[in-house]
Image (spheres, grey):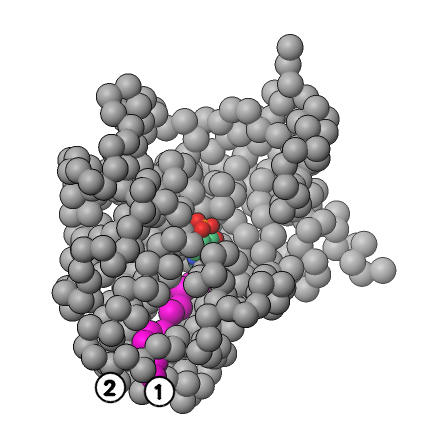
Amino acid sequence: MRVTLDDIRARELRHVLQTYKRQPVAFVRGSGARLFDTDGREYLDFVSGIGVTSLGHAHPGLTAAIADQAATLLHTSNLYYHPFQAEAAARLSELSGLTRTFFCNSGTEAVEACLKFARRYWYTQGAKDRTEFVALEGGFAGRTFGSLSVTHDEHYRAPFAPLLAGVTFVDPASPDALTAAVTTRTVAVIAEPIQGEGGIRPLSPAFAAALNDVCARTGTLYIADEVQTGLGRTGHPFYFQALGLRPDLISVGKALGGGVPVGATLVSERVAQAISAGDHGSTYGGNLLGTRAAVFVLTQLMEGGLIEHVKTVGAHFERRLRTLALKHPIVTEVRGAGVMRGLQLSVDAMPVIDAARDRGLLVNRTDEKVVRLLPPLTIEPADIDRAVDTLDTVLAAIAPEVAV
Ligand SMILES: Cc1ncc(COP(=O)(O)O)c(C=O)c1O
């Protein structure tokens, strides 16, 4: 018997903790940039599981690697060696320039490890009163207590107070505020090179320069949260590279496993030297399945010409979105890089998301008035055109309503 959306919904309402406001659709199959729902209806996917399925759905090579690993050995624990952690770590090091990797299972865990390793660095230096963090207004770093503590949105934070003490948030539009906020008690500054959940907002060159400067002068560590921006999405291996930033720690997640949960914290050699056995750990972290998937994704990125592809289609995407914005005054700004794009609207973005889905295009809302577009890195120009044409139709239908 075929499962229906109504059945799934009814069962979820009874049994699944209602932490998510889901859209009224259930997917059962995917292929490349396409998803198929319980009625067999096809959608063009410009969400990619929120920046996760970078190689598209059911990528044959990734599928084969995962299937082979599942049939060979899934998990043994960090009590023992296996081949794939070192292989994935070597590739991450080549892409980032940071020398060592700790593996975990998600973005929030990658951030937690960054915060712990950064504190551990100063503890090892004997600076035990250096315990505080500087984070950014509009920043998002995850939902566990440490990463929530450096996440700005009060809506996420308030019900769970008290969070980590000693976190100062600064306005990313103010390099001077950053310089003033860093003190002799600051462990690290954490910042996404492009704020993802905060509305696809890249750091300005002036802010990046102030960040480099204050870290160089005070020894403060910089944590680049690249969970959403990392691994080719912006047309660069990491977006800190495009901004000329110099991180000591990088959090990675989302795209790393192409859909298999795996995260990583990359650290510089000076931080690595401060870490000892037993300082941190994870039962699943770096398991064979996750790191085998990561090796496959990283190989595609480094040897499959994917980053060049993102640069080319990203430029096309930007041109098409800028033309769209000129046509529709409710689009007030186009932001982002590569295939990580945001349309700032002057109105709530949710009606656009719903109308696009009705027309077979999946996009998502962030920061209330931003339409976020995260197609797979493998997206072709014809699908970008199709998505932008759909948005054109949707915006044309919505704008008159807004005007009244
Ligand atoms: C920049 C950034 N950091 C951390 C996270 C948390 O990742 P996860 O949801 O895998 O825990 C996210 C998730 O959206 C993110 O965008």
Choose top left, top right, bottom left or bottom right for residue 41: top right
Q: What kind of element bears circle 2?
A: helix
Choose top left, top right, bottom left or bottom right for residue 186: bottom left
Vertical arrangement, residue 26 with respect to residue 245, above or below: above
Camera-nearest residue between 9 and 314: 9
Q: Residue 146, how many percent across, how many down?
A: 43, 63
Residue depicted at 64% across the width and 14% down the height: 2
Classify mark 1: residues with Cα within 10 Å, few (<14), some (14-19) or many (20+): some
Disc tally is 2
Left or right: 319 in relation to 262: right
Residue 245 in view here? no
Classify mark 2: residues with Cα within 10 Å, few (<14), some (14-19) or many (20+): few
Magenta residues, start to end: 185-196
Q: Residue 257, how many percent across, how many down?
A: 34, 39
Inspect the magenta stretch and tell me whether residue 189 lies in it. Answer: yes
Quarter holding the N terminus is top right
Q: Where does label 2 land, which residue?
A: 217
Q: Quadrant of ligand 1?
A: bottom left
Residue depicted at 38% across the width and 36% down the height: 260
Q: What kind of element bears circle 1?
A: loop
Identify residue type, mark 1: Thr
Alpha-carbon distance for marks 2 and 1?
11 Å
Vertical arrangement, residue 240 with respect to residue 287, above or below: below
Residue depicted at 16% across the width and 47% down the height: 90
Label the magenta part by its dominant secondary structure.
Answer: strand
Identify residue type, mark 2: Arg
Q: Where does label 1 land, which residue?
A: 183
Camera-nearest residue between 202 and 397: 202
Going from the N terminus, do you reach mark 2 or mark 1 first? Answer: 1
Asked if the residues shown at circle 2 and circle 1 are in contact, with their CB atoms under 8 angstroms apart, the answer is no
Extreme residue toward the top, this view? 1
